[in-house]
Image: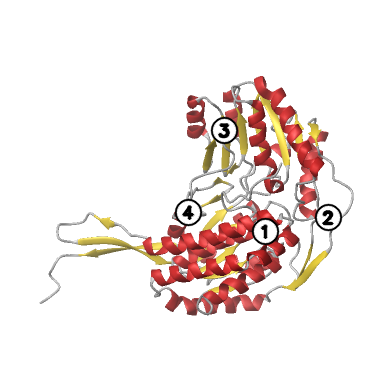
Amino acid sequence: MTYPALRIAPTDTPSVPEEDASEVMTIEDPHDGSPVGSIPCTPLPELDEAVRRGREASVSWRQTAPAERGRLLVLAAEALAANADDLASLNHRETGRPVDEALGGLLAGAGTLRQYGELGPLHRGHQLRGAFGAVDYTIAEPRGVAVLLTPWNDPVAVAAGLIGAALASGNVVVHKPSERCPHLGRLLGEILGPVFPTNVLTTVLGGPATGAALAAHPGADVIAHVGSTATGQAISLAARETGAHVIRENGGKDPLLVDSEVDPVWAADQAALGAFANSGQICTSVERIYVHRLVAKPFLAALSYRARELNGSRSLAPLVDRRLREVVAGQVDAALAAGAVCLEGGRVPEGPGAWYPATVLGECTPDMEVMREETFGPVAPVMVVESFEEGLTAADSGRYGLAATVLTPDLAHAQQAVAQLAVGTVKVNAVFGGAPGGAAQPRGDSGAGFGYGPELLDEFSRVKVVHMAPGGARR
């Protein structure tokens, strides 16, 4: 089975420990461990210069007509599409993502730049109902310097969305791509940066120390972060000192609830797509499954079969690196030790690279880490429930609130799930999908603020209210 390139929402960096920052980042190909290359980090003192130069450039950029900013974003989209093959190749080598899926993400990124190029000039204020004869209205103004910290699992699409919304709103951007794909991030900056006036879009490279320095920089007016919950919370703490506005899309543990009257084979197909697409490295991947006992046996058989097909054809891409694989394997091993049953996969393969098989775990319990904490790998842990209400209560548990999926033919059950689930997005009868331009607000430890869609223009703006009283000013 093959999966399409997905661009459903900004994707997430897993909640795994980061390596210590160093002056040089060395990347290995996750397919076979061969070297991709080494790349120097931006020296920390140069970060001050990047922010300072951005501040200077913001004076003229904010005064640039929205239509002109939009025109440049369209040119940036064309430049991105023209270099798609080179970017996709680097994406494949640095993160392991198949080239066709990488190209899908790149084209989605180009489309997002075009979208914000069109939406920026249409970003409207509001007329307010004031006194008779008075004029009251609002103006959206750029925040200033936007620091963007983006992940590796859909690196171009996510970066393009944040860059597009920030620039369309009149902000200048300092962008730090993930240290797991620095060559890709550098090339992206070399392609997009020259499209705009000098210092309007600056790319810096580095690891956690670089990101922490930017997040705490007093010259940052807004910080957008797509990544781990721990890092996002640290950014929010730093922003309390500087006053920067923070937009976060962070970790998730998205549940899938399978009702008693669904076709179990169809439900298994949905579960396989949600759990195994991009090797489980999507922010809205299915990470825990609650299936009604009446359909549990055929559902588990069909899901295990789908996983076995993937493993037999070896069509699943490797994980981004061995460090992440250790986290995934550790959760699976702990679940097995606590009584879970491995129905497929579950073993680290021998040989080079960061491969991990599509894995199905049965007889899981709520206390297992694999049912509580983000896994970010191709693992489908399944818990059998006795009723829809029991499954819904379990799905609504935990500290994350990114998204959830409910598979049911029962309209009342669907409405009950929509009302009860404390998540930013509820999907009924499809694990992926959504209208173009849709937006959502993560809840709990999954983040805060709109991370995409037209509402992202609001996040990158601050509102000024104008009241003009009638007459009286002239002598």
- Which residue lies under the disc numbered 2? 353
The three-letter code of the residue at mark 2 reads Gly
Amino acid type, label 4: Gly
Q: What x and y, as percent, mark residue 169? A: 44, 65
- Kindly identify the amino acid type of the residue bearing the numbered disc 1: Trp
The front one of 299 and 341 is 299
Of pointers 4 and 3, the one earlier in the residue sequence: 3
Q: Which mark identifies residue 406? A: 3
The span from disc 4 to disc 3 (Cα, nearest Å) is: 23 Å
Q: Which residue is mark 1?
A: 152
Q: For the residues marked 1 and 2, what is the alpha-carbon distance in whole angstroms? A: 17 Å
Q: Residues within 10 Å of mark 2 (few under 14, many from 20)?
A: many
Can residue 314 be seen from the camera position used here? yes
- The kind of secondary structure element at disc 1 is loop
Residue depicted at 58% across the width and 24% down the height: 388
Assign the N terminus to one quadrant of the image: top right
Disc with the residue nearer the chain's start (3 vs 1):
1
Q: Quadrant of residue 306?
A: top right
- The residue nearer to you, when weighing 139 against 97, is 97
